[in-house]
Image: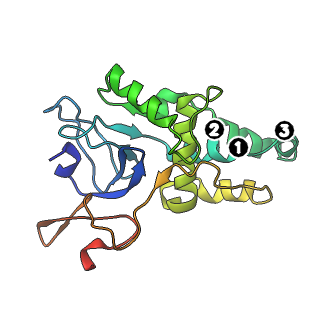
């Protein structure tokens, strides 16, 4: 059992070999294992911590979305924005990586494996020699949140308004979500004081 299995959470999908989880309660960073982490329902998490893969906690998901959107427009498009909107978007899109990506006890080998995975031809948009891995990850998750998890983005309405006149496309396509009918294996919810396993974000696997 992984650390995240100690808490209620949803299984969202996969980014390569890493599962994406959404905590439904606050996870305390108690440090009883090497890979424990703190998180809450405003976060997404890659990897489940102790017993699975070291966790990567994703903070401030509105910044992920802003980066995904801003990188699709041209300089001419940018000039059409009001100064207020442009400053708002830039302040979100160019936050320091350390504020967004919390690598919890990742070793060099695990970072190297992640980099190798990101370059794989099996990805929708694979990492190229001209890409920064952190940007690739941020835009991949930003696309997911923009299209499928807008309720996790506190700036969804503002960003949607600002970019409504621009052509935005799902250019990354790196997150895989299992369709209904597939056997559920991730996610936990507490019902009637009992843990029920197989809680997916996008369908109710318990009713299959």
Where residue 48 appears, x then y in whole percent? 27, 43
Comes first in the chain, label 1 or label 3: 1
Label 2 environment density (alpha carbons within 10 Å; few <14, some 14–19, many ≥20): many
The residue located at (23%, 32%) in the rendering is 35
Sooner in the amino-acid sequence: mark 1 or mark 2: 1
Q: Residue at x 29, y 26 (%)?
A: 105
Q: Residue furthest front?
A: 121
Q: The residue tagged with tag 1: helix, strand or loop?
A: helix
Indicate the position of residue 13 as horizontal and vertical percent values.
40, 55
Q: Secondary structure at mark 3?
A: helix
Which image quadrant for residue 117?
Answer: top left
- Indicate left or right for 189 with 68 as reference: left
Q: Quadrant of residue 71?
A: top right
Most foreground residue, 177 or 45: 177
The image quadrant where one finds the C terminus is bottom left
Q: Is label 1 in contact with label 2 (beta carbons under 8 Å)?
A: yes
Say if mark 1 contacts mark 3, CB within 8 Å: no
Single out the mark in the foreground, 3 or 2.
3
Q: Quick one: label 3, few (<14), some, or many (20+) residues within 10 Å?
A: few
Q: Nearer the viewer, residue 4 or 185?
A: 185
Does any portion of residue 148 appear in the rendered image?
yes
Question: Distance from label 1 to label 2 (Cα)?
Answer: 7 Å
Height in image: 169 above or below 2?
Answer: below
Asked if one can make out residue 62 in the rendered structure from this viewpoint, the answer is no
Read off the residue under disc 1.
70
Residue at the spot of label 3? 75
Distance, label 3 to label 2, CA atoms, is: 15 Å
Q: Can you give x and y, in whole percent of width and height, for residue 49 in the image? A: 24, 39
The span from disc 1 to disc 3 (Cα, nearest Å) is 10 Å
Which residue is labeled 2 in the image?
Answer: 93
The residue most toward the bottom is 207
């Amino acid at each position: 059992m992984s650390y995240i299995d100690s808490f209620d959470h949803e299984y969202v999908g996969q980014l390569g070999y890493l599962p994406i989880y959404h905590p439904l309660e606050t996870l305390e960073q108690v440090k009883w294992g090497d890979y424990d982490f703190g998180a809450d329902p405003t976060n997404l998490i890659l990897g489940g911590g102790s017993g699975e893969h070291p966790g990567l906690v994703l903070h401030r998901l509105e910044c992920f979305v802003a980066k995904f959107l801003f990188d699709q427009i041209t300089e001419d498009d940018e000039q059409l924005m009001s100064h207020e909107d442009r400053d708002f978007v830039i302040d979100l899109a160019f936050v320091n990586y350390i504020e967004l990506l919390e690598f919890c006890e990742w070793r060099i080998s695990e970072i190297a494996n992640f980099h190798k995975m990101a370059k794989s031809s099996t990805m929708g948009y694979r990492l190229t020699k001209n890409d920064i891995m952190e940007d690739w990850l941020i835009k991949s998750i930003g696309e997911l949140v923009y299209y499928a998890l807008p309720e996790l983005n506190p700036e969804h309405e503002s960003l949607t308004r600002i970019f409504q006149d621009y052509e935005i496309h799902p250019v990354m396509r790196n997150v895989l979500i299992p369709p209904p009918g597939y056997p559920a294996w991730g996610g936990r919810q507490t019902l009637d004081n009992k843990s029920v396993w197989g809680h997916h974000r996008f369908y109710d696997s318990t009713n299959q």
